[in-house]
Image (cartoon, rainbow, N blue to C red):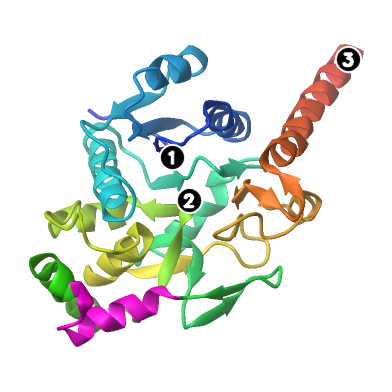
Amino acid sequence: MKPFLNLVVVVPVGPTCKIDFLLDTLSSVKYYIHSRYKIIIVDDSQNPNHERDIKHHFPEVVFRANPRNYGKGMGLYTSLCNAYSYALDHFDFPVLLRLDTDALIIGRDPELPIIEFFKKNPNVGLAGRYVTGLHSYDDFGNLWTNYGREVYVAIAKIFTKFFLKHPFIYWRVRKILFKALYQEYELGEVVFGGAYAFSRIGLEKLREHGLLPVKNVIGADLDEDHFFTMTIGYVGLGFGDLASGDLPFACVWRGLPASPETLHQANKKIIHSTRFWKDMKEEEIRKYFRDIRDRIVSDFVYKNSEN
């Protein structure tokens, strides 16, 4: 019998990963998530020291090293699919949370609103910072221009530079695209990949249809989050917004969507990317949120000592 978890957290690690930043992200998971969970590290770095360094601090994580460097894009898609299949095979869980190494948990129990969202929306397979249309603004005024639409328009047209470069790969992608469009997937819509959540039903549907992973697509010039979104559309499931209003996500592609203070005051719980905010560098941003965690611990210890 598979052990029951409330949440599986998958973190892909690449060759340029700074181990201290990764450990800080894992620390934020451990600090703020109080449900039963398991972390799966998908290591694409080919660094023989990563497993030792990570397990020294977090011995409970599942560490899965790729046999070779799969790279980004559809290589990352394949790598993540293997991790998601592992999770399905070994654990019983309602929700899987994927975090980049430059994502961070900054609020208590982020899994609870995500689990509740999927309970209320059983036809949704993938949720997070959901982008539809060519332009999309978030609550902090950030504009997302969805350039991925142009790529899928080119694939739909056929006999473009994509087909000339890898005709068999893009023919496979095109067949999936047209089936997804038939299922009311909107061309180029995406749930951003820096941090998102799959329902277990979504992952099971992908595997049931042979999409976890789609074989022989490494080499396609596609982003993995666009492709995952399209495949969820292919199996007839929808997408969800977990970023608007008081929902937990606050994500943009590069840097933070707002200042650390604003994100903290807005009660956001999952953010991307810690790389920078205006003139603030990653070390400073992570220190700001780490100091909050340390301060909460200090206040808790002090209050209990008074009792």
Look at discs 3 and 1 and give the one toward the viewer.
Answer: 1
Nearest the eye: 258 or 157: 157
Task: Name which residue type carries label 3.
Answer: Asn
Nearer-N-terminus badge (3/2) = 2
| Residue 220 position in % (x across, y down) | 22, 62
Nearest the eye: 112 or 166: 166
Q: According to the image, label 1 marks what residue?
A: 7
* Helix, strand or loop under label 2: helix
Can residue 253 be seen at all in this image of the molecule? Answer: yes
The residue shown at (87%, 12%) is 305
Look at discs 3 and 2 and give the one toward the viewer.
Answer: 2
Residue range in magenta is 147-162
Q: According to the image, label 3 marks what residue?
A: 307
Marks 3 and 1 in Cβ contact (< 8 Å): no
Quick one: label 2, few (<14), some, or many (20+) residues within 10 Å?
Answer: some
Q: According to the image, label 2 marks what residue?
A: 115
The residue shown at (72%, 53%) is 277
In the image, is residue 109 above or below residue 2? Answer: below
Nearer-N-terminus badge (3/1) = 1
Q: Quadrant of residue 187?
A: bottom left
Nearest the eye: 229 or 221: 221
Marks 2 and 1 in Cβ contact (< 8 Å): yes
The residue shown at (44%, 75%) is 147
Disc 3 versus disc 1: distance between alpha carbons? 34 Å
Please say whether residue 224 is one of the residues in the magenta stretch. no
Please say whether residue 151 is one of the residues in the magenta stretch. yes
Q: Quadrant of residue 185?
A: bottom left
* Helix, strand or loop under label 1: strand
Q: Is residue 103 left or right of residue 12?
A: right
Is the C terminus in the top left, top right, bottom left or bottom right quadrant? top right
